[in-house]
Structure formats: C-alpha cells, structure tokens
Image (spheres, rainbow, N blue to C red):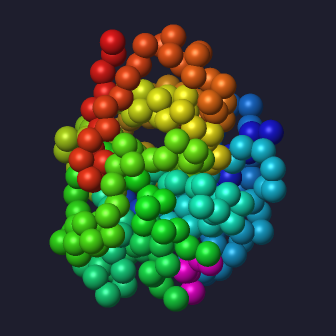
Amino acid sequence: MLTVVEIPQWQGSLSPTAPKLVEGASRLAAMVPQARHVRVDTGDTLAETAARVRRALPQDGFIVTVGGDCGVELEPVAAALRRYGDRLNVVWFDAHGDMNTPATSPSGAFHGMILRTLQGEGPRDLVPSPALRPNQVALAGTRSLDPAEADYIREAGIGGLSGIGDDAVLYIHVDLDVLDGITSVGYPEPGGLSAQALAEAVAVLAARHEIVGLGITEYAPSDPRDEEMLRRLVPELVRLCSASGPWQIGCLADAALTVHATTAYGDITARSL
C-alpha cells in the first residue's frame, strides 16, 4: 500500500516564507495519487513533532513523506535505518548540504542540520539511534555549502551517486530547492537541476536499487508555474520510487535515459540518448 505522510512542520526553517510550508505540505500530499493519507499535526517543539511522526509512521507499504521543512525527514530516515541497517543509503537531492551542527550553524535553523543530525551530531533531543555513517550518505545537486559543512564533507569522505554500492537500498530525499528556477522555496539557488533531469536521475537509481522511502520537502507555494510543474513531477517521482527494484531494469532501459554522476558533492548532469 502507498501511504503519504503529511508533516506541515515549518518551525525548522527561519525563511520569511516558512509559514507557507504548511500549505505546501497539503498541496504536495494532494499530488500523490491513489494513496492513503496520514497527516501529523506539529507539536510545541521539534522533538514533540518527531515523536508524533514516529508513532504515526505505517509499519508496511511504501511511504512518501511530504513537508514542511527538511527536518521532517528525521523519523522516516531513522525508521528506514532501523529496518535496513548497513544496506541503507540516503540520497540527498538538495541545493544545500544540511550538515551544520548547533555549533557551526550560522542561522540555528534545524533544517540546515538535519542530515548531520541523522549522522549522530545535532540537537541532543533530536539525534536518532542508531545513526547513519557518512558512507551511507550521497549528495546530489548540492551547490551551496557553509565552510564548516564543506570541511566536514571533505573530511568524512561523503560523495555522490557514483559511490553507492550495488547492494544498497535507497531512501530518496528531495528538497525542491535542488531544482533550477523554482521560486516557491525558502532559499532558491541558481544552477540547479531541471525537473526532467531530476526525474531521470531518480529513474536510473530506481532501475538499479530498491527505493525504500521518498521524502519531498520545502514547498512554499508562491508561483502558479511551480505548481504546474510539480503536479507533473511529484506523481512521476512517486511512481518511479514505489515501483523500484532490480526487476525494473529492462523497463526503464527502454526509456533511454542516462545519468552521469560526478564530483564529491554529488553534482549530476542528465541527458537523453
């Protein structure tokens, strides 16, 4: 069964548009067709919201988490890690690294710490157990890093898509600011992926690996053109991820899509053959 878990958390972001993430979560959830819908109301603190999400997550079927800020990924990724252990790799499609700690964050916003928190370094009441190891993380489309994040990525040896092992199962995270030209996000960055390139990248990953979870975050609706684009993109990402696995290689090969993954920060380019 396909379940969409809507988490309208915005308190992890300090963007002036952060309150719009509540509406964005609702709109993203509505874009997932033929799915059971679970909405998790936010608590007074991020830790309380995380506890509510932990209790609400289904125990079976494919789960699509929609936010809300990137911090909504805390419990879905932690649940996948508990289930799949060392086989799990998290693919982080995001313009930003999200790898600050409370000590290094320029803003103090949790959505900029979530991926580091998942690796065991973050606000004390939010660090999961067990935690991801750096070699279980792959960055994609990342192009804006704070100095401390860049240092950590280099020292920890975090790479891109080409470093994913053949037997890995994947959790796919998509912060919509990974896209080029989108304005309905809190911190847009130039030079990102087109919607087609993102879909092609996910298609290749889904052909090679089982996708065990998908998160889509940071939609702050402001431009009808973004909404129109997402109404096509979101169902396609869900379709690709929920039907993933090695058995899909033949079907997806017929689509004649290739992706070239390069650089330690996971930059990707996609092209049609």
Tag count in the figure? 0
Q: Is residue 114 left or right of residue 211?
A: left
User: Is 126 a magenta residue?
Assistant: yes
- Seen at 49% across and 28% down, the residue is 203
The quadrant of the picture occupied by the N terminus is: top right
In the image, residue 93 above or below residue 123: above
**x then y, percent, for residue 91:** 46, 50
Asked where in the image residue 237 lies, by quadrant, the reply is: top right
Specify whether residue 65 is in view. Answer: yes
**x then y, percent, for residue 38:** 74, 53
Viewer-closest of 185 and 121: 121
In the image, residue 10 above or below residue 201: below
**x then y, percent, for residue 211:** 61, 42
Viewer-closest of 15 and 270: 270
- Seen at 18% across and 72% down, the residue is 147
Q: In this view, does 242 lie to the left or right of 104?
A: right
Toward the front, the furthest residue is 166
In the image, residue 67 above or below residue 208: below
The quadrant of the picture occupied by the C terminus is: top left
Q: Is residue 190 left or right of residue 222?
A: left
**x then y, percent, for residue 139:** 36, 52
Q: What stretch is highlighted in magenta?
A: 125-129
User: Is 119 a magenta residue?
Assistant: no
- Seen at 48% across and 72% down, the residue is 119
Chief secondary structure of the magenta portion: loop
Specify whether residue 24 is in view. Answer: no
In the image, residue 207 above or below residue 209: above
Q: In this view, does 177 lie to the left or right of 217?
A: left
